[in-house]
Image (cartoon, rainbow, N blue to C red):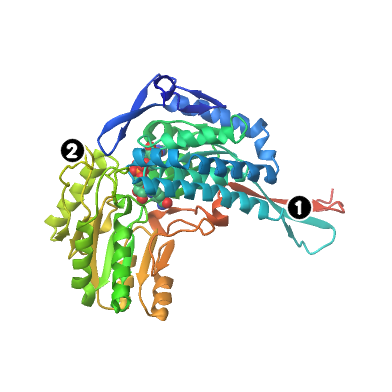
Amino acid sequence: MAAQQAEQTIHVGGEWRPALSGATREILDPADAEPFAVVAEGDEKDADLAVAAARRAFDEGPWPHTPVAGRAALLRRVADLLVRDREELGLLESRDAGKTLEEGRVDIDCVADAFRYFADLVVGEGGGRVVDAGTADVHSVVVHEPVGVCALITPWNYPLLQASWKIAPALAAGNTFVVKPSEITPLTTVALLRLLAEAGLPDGVAGLVTGPGHTVGARLAEHPDVDLVSFTGGLVSGTKVARAAADTVKKVALELGGKNPNVVFADSCATEEGFDTAVDQALNAAFIHSGQVCSAGSRLIVEESLRERFVAELARRAGAIRLGRGTGEGVECGPLVSERQRARTEEYVASALEEGAVLRAGGKRPEPSELRPANGYFYEPTVLDRCHRDMRVVREEVFGPVLTVETFTTEDEAVALANDTEYGLAGAVWTADAGRARRVAGRLRHGTVWINDFHPYLPQAEWGGFGRSGVGRELGPSGLAEYRETKHVYQNLAPAPVRWFAG
Ligand code: NAD
């Protein structure tokens, strides 16, 4: 970004502008802690301006009344532009969030998929649902309408992907919105807003305010002219958002954290191939993007008889993961996103060791190297054996490259351990026994359950959590329904007096 334009990252009523206060923020590259971009540091006043523009665009603009075919066509153009800019956006995401370049590219593919999915979904729907009122004198139909102005608040781990799971359905349903990306990773969301304009979205429909959660985010959540707030982030901030939204009875959707169990039965590892697959996927579940994934498989719950062999191989492979700058040749895993996130990880590992966990891999910062600048926020993939449910590291979301190991001897015990969490986002079961797979999957209290796999999601299948992992669902038909009001239109075709009141 050119220095002059760099600070114009607030988008209001179709215009790019700096913060009203003139404040700015440097965006750091987590691989070396060097600033590489500057953005506007908005506050409550910028949020107010953006909401006013989105309100006008909803109340007076053409978008809510644009036929679905037109909305879908725009979403498809956005998907095409994302494909065109895949390399540039993938690199930006890699640099901003500290993920590998390949992960950045995959993220952009998934973002394009979300836009295409919601385009297909809205054009494939029937109009309203005709309801049989039991008489030919009444025509009754249930229709869907956009909610209105949506506030979309997103986290730093999958900045553009999480934004797209909100922006694509919000637009498909005919809403206007103001998005607030994480203050530390706003760059690809800024780039997406430029693509929305290039695709022909009318001015004012899409607003963006870069800035902190406690000012911009909090104002959006409480703003009386916002109809819906959709938030993805941590439990603490999510709770504050729900409270702030309560006074104006906004619709609230929350996608929060997870403490996700990966349950491995010994029968899944009866063959060498089965063992290799289960270990490989446990590694991927826990350490992709340095564990900074809401659905990270951070709790390995393995059958006691398999523990020693499984953990030994897992620890060996964790120790071999190549850490470095996301764009580095052969790098498999990037740094943590910030010094704060690394310090938090270190604190959890220290508390686990104090509570009796046994360190099998990692547990420290790696030596700097050509691929790993000394100032980067790197931390070694860490395996903690002999953990139990009373440890903080087992109960709380670390959001770093830390895998805890617990064991079980019976199926009931495995299920009880897997469900013993205040969260309920995702979990997996590994077994060669088809009956057991179905039984355990049926008993897990998590929004996504994988059988003999970990991490895949489908845009056409709902994503979200049980328990404190959230409220509502993203993706799938429910992910569109979040952005709609439902209206029952009852038409009397033969009006006549009711005569309830005799006079
Ligand atoms: P965070 O809660 O710190 O921040 C998320 C967003 O909320 C940011 O934009 C932040 O500025 C904003 N925010 C902070 N305080 C706010 C307030 N009081 N009012 C309004 N907005 C506020 O989370 P994070 O550290 O950016 O992201 C990591 C968390 O996100 C993890 O807990 C992770 O599990 C969760 N997450 C969940 C999903 C999911 O699908 N369930 C996906 C990705 C991340």
Relative horizontal placement of residue 113, taking residue 33 as reference (left or right) = right
Residue 294 in picture, x, y percent from top left: 36, 52
Residue that badge 2 annotates:
374
Camera-nearest residue between 82 and 364: 82
Identify which residue is drawn at 27% across, 50% down.
Answer: 400
Identify which residue is drawn at 55% across, 34% down.
Answer: 206
View quadrant of ligand 1:
top left
Q: In the image, which is nearer the foreground, mark 2 or mark 1?
A: 2
Up/down of 77 relative to 310, above or below: above
Q: Amino acid at mark 1?
A: Tyr
Does the residue at mark 2 contact the one at mark 1 (Cβ under 8 Å)? Answer: no
- The quadrant holding residue 328 is top left
Residue 381 in picture, x, y percent from top left: 22, 54
Judging from the image, what secondary structure is the residue with disc 2 in? loop
Residue that badge 1 annotates:
490
Identify which residue is drawn at 69% across, 40% down.
Answer: 66
Q: Is residue 217 visible?
A: yes
Query: How many residues crowd mark 2 within 10 Å: few (<14), some (14–19), many (20+)?
Result: some
- The quadrant holding residue 412 is bottom left
Q: Amino acid at mark 2?
A: Ala
Camera-nearest residue between 183 and 323: 323
Relative horizontal placement of residue 305, taking residue 256 as reference (left or right) = left
Residue 4 in picture, x, y percent from top left: 42, 19
Query: How many residues crowd mark 1 within 10 Å: few (<14), some (14–19), many (20+)?
Result: few
Relative horizontal placement of residue 114, taking residue 275 as reference (left or right) = right
Up/down of 59 relative to 476, above or below: above
Up/down of 194 relative to 380, above or below: above
Judging from the image, what secondary structure is the residue with disc 1 in? strand
Quadrant for the N terminus in the image: top left
Residue 220 in picture, x, y percent from top left: 47, 34
- The quadrant holding residue 65 is top right
